[in-house]
Amino acid sequence: MSEELASAVAEEAAKAQQPAAAQQAPQQQGTDLNISDLVALKSILEVASQRGAFKANELEAVGRTFNKLNAFLESVAKKEA
């Protein structure tokens, strides 16, 4: 991944985490994975695929994973609403 792409992906991930980070209580750095992390991952996948970071033979797996992640996030959003 080029430095420019890596920088853009990191920037998108930071944008995705900003609203959620403001609402969460401070936690220790660790292996905890939360919904805002998954939202950031979704944004990273979107940016990376738009910029051609994946090879053609990888697109099916990336798309399938993205769809599963998106469905999970939508179900969580419905439960919280």
Image: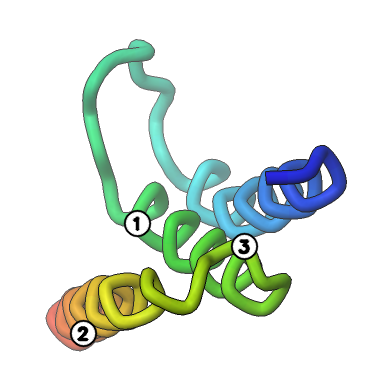
Closer to the eye: label 3 or 2: 3
The vertical placement of 72 against 37, above or below, is: below
Cα–Cα span, label 3 and label 1: 19 Å
Instruction: Residue 15: name its quadrant.
Output: bottom right
Query: Are the residues at dot 3 and dot 2 in contact (C-beta closer than 8 Å)?
Result: no
* Amino acid bearing label 3: Ala
The crowd level at tag 3 (other Cα within 10 Å; few <14, some 14-19, many 20+) is: some
Label at residue 53:
3
Q: Amino acid at mark 1?
A: Leu
Q: Where does the C terminus fall, quadrant-wise?
A: bottom left
Residue 2, disc: none
Residue 78 is at least partly visible in this image: yes
Disc 3 from disc 2: Cα separation: 23 Å
- Please say if the residues under marks 3 and 1 sit with CB atoms less than 8 Å apart: no
9 sits left or right of 64 in the view: right
Counting residues from the start of the chain, the first of labels 3 and 2 encountered is 3
Q: What residue is shown at x 30% (from left), y 55% (from top)?
A: 35
Above or below residue 16? Residue 79 is below
Checking the image for residue 71, the label placed there is 2
- The N terminus sits in image quarter: top right
Left or right: residue 49 versus residue 79 is right
Q: Which residue is mark 1?
A: 38
Q: Position of residue 76 (x, y in %)?
A: 18, 75
Q: CA distance from mark 2 to mark 1?
A: 12 Å
Residue 56 vs 22, above or below: the answer is below
The amino acid beneath tag 2 is Ala
